[in-house]
Amino acid sequence: MIAAAERRFALDRRDEKGFSVRQHLESLEKRGKLTAAQQAELHGAQIPEETLDIWDLFNEIAQTRGSSGFGPLPISALEIKAWSELKQFPISPWEFDLLRRLDQAYLQANA
């Protein structure tokens, strides 16, 4: 899951003009100019179906992420705990660890 997330984060990174790699590749695909390697890059970042729930959970919690003005801040343990309590959705220790690993992958992709 982490590897797929890292690929997705890389695809969503924006260039100096504000366009993501994903947008560029999708534009090439619409025009029929996508190479096999580019097609693998675009469509190879699928989150495994058995982990989609935790992926959705990460994306919902990530909406609370702050910024320092120099880039995104990590999602703190307290933010995860607060989200869990507000939503009345208990998060197991392994889910917590996975959320933190996803967040680290996100931060690295957006450094």
Image (cartoon, rainbow, N blue to C red):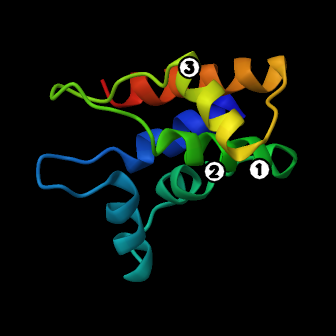
Q: Marks 1 and 3: in contact by CB < 8 Å?
A: no
What residue does disc 3 label?
A: 78
What residue does disc 2 label?
A: 44
Please name the amino acid that badge 2 sits on: Gly
Numbered tag placed on residue 52 in the rendering:
1
- Relative to 106, say whether 55 is above or below: below
The residue located at (35%, 24%) in the rendering is 73
- Front residue of 58 and 36: 58
Between the C-alphas of marks 2 and 3, the distance is: 33 Å
Q: Is residue 48 left or right of residue 43?
A: right
Please name the amino acid that badge 3 sits on: Leu
Instruction: Specify which label sits upstream in the sequence, 2 or 3.
Output: 2
Q: Nearer the viewer, mark 2 or mark 1?
A: 1
- Front residue of 67 and 10: 67
Secondary element type, mark 2:
loop
Numbered tag placed on residue 10 in the rendering:
none
User: What number of labels is visible?
Assistant: 3
| Image position, residue 27 (x, y; %) | 35, 73
